[in-house]
Image (cartoon, grey):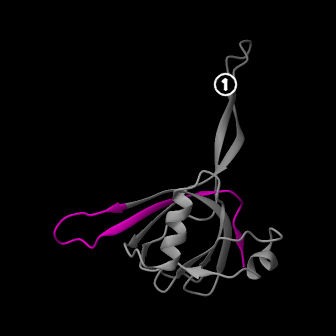
Amino acid sequence: MTTETVATATLSVSATLPATNDAAGFAALIWTPIGELTDIGSVKGRSYNTSTHAPIASAQQIEKKASYKLGNADMTVGWDSADAGQVIIETGANSNTATYAFKLVKQGGGIRYFTAQVMSFVENMGSVDNVVQGQFTLLRQTDTISV
């Protein structure tokens, strides 16, 4: 098993959605890096709800895996209002309908593609010893494609 750290990973955004929801569709897009990224949230996996059936005659509650949602991805950046990637993120946060394509390149070269809406992008000042940070949440819209 090969493990890796998050060091050197990059996250990029495209305001254009892929023509096809596969690796080739995403690879054809033009990507804008999101600068000053300091914390990358979860971009892969599902979270399932539980469906419970409770027949009176048996008194046993039966639980089954039910519907799912794609987990939110919480990200942190050093605030840079001139960074082109952060500008796209802020635009998305101010839109009720915009969905963007995202590309995460991991340290070992693995790629994760997904689409998401930007739920929020807020500036966090912190204390005297903190760098001003931007925190944004991505609401994933498609399962993540691993390359």
Q: Is residue 93 left or right of residue 44?
A: left
Residue pushed farthest right? 20
- Picture quadrant where residue 44 is located: bottom right
Look at label 1 and name its amino acid.
Gln
**Relative to 115, is 28 above or below?**
below
Q: Position of residue 95 (x, y in %)?
A: 57, 55
Quadrant, the C terminus: bottom right
- Specify few, some or many for label 1: CA neighbours under 10 Å numbering under 14, 14-19, or 20 or more: few
Does the magenta run of residues contain 77?
Answer: no
Q: Position of residue 10 (x, y in %)?
A: 53, 81
Residue closer to the observer: 28 or 1 = 28
Residue pushed farthest top? 57
Q: Position of residue 74 (x, y in %)?
A: 48, 61
Magenta region: which residues? 123-147
Q: Position of residue 62 (x, y in %)?
A: 70, 29
Q: Is residue 25 left or right of residue 99?
A: right
Q: Secondary structure at mark 1?
A: loop
**Relative to 84, is 101 above or below?**
above
Residue sitting at x 54%, y 64%: 91
